[in-house]
Image (cartoon, helix red, strand yellow):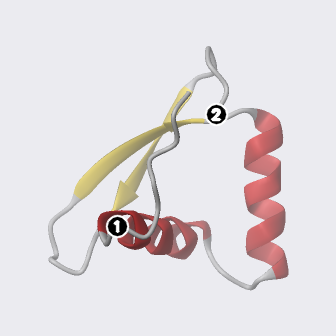
Amino acid sequence: MVQGKSKKPVRFVPKDGLDHKVTFRVSAEELKRVRIYCIEHSVSSQELLHNLMVDFLDGKLDWPQG
């Protein structure tokens, strides 16, 4: 992730039904890569975020250090 970029809040609603607001800091290039991935894999950015967060909460992903 790039430091010093504006934050864009992203809403994550897990299966427990609770509403969580998650804030990511991304560069324009990173956002472009996410959009391309979503188009190529026919997935919405919300679905992608949901899957990543579920994997993280299940311990399948480590939080990046940086």
SS at mark 2? loop
Of labels 1 and 2, earlier in sequence is 2
Mark 2 residue type: Met
Q: Is residue 61 left or right of residue 59?
A: right
**66 w.r.t. 26: above or below:** above
Specify few, some or many for label 1: CA neighbours under 10 Å numbering under 14, 14-19, or 20 or more.
Answer: few
Q: Are discs 1 and 2 less than 8 Å apart at CB?
A: no
The residue under the point 51% across, 68% down is: 46
Judged from this view, the residue extending furthest toward the bottom is 42
Residue assigned mark 1: 59
Residue 5 x, y percent position in the rendering: 63, 21
**61 w.r.t. 24: above or below:** below
* Residue closer to the observer: 16 or 60: 60
The residue under the point 46% across, 62% down is: 61
Residue 64 x, y percent position in the rendering: 52, 42
* Residue closer to the observer: 42 or 59: 59
Q: Which quadrant, please, contains the C terminus?
A: top right
Mark 1 residue type: Gly
Residue assigned mark 2: 1
Which numbered disc, 1 or 2, marks the residue closer to the eye? 1
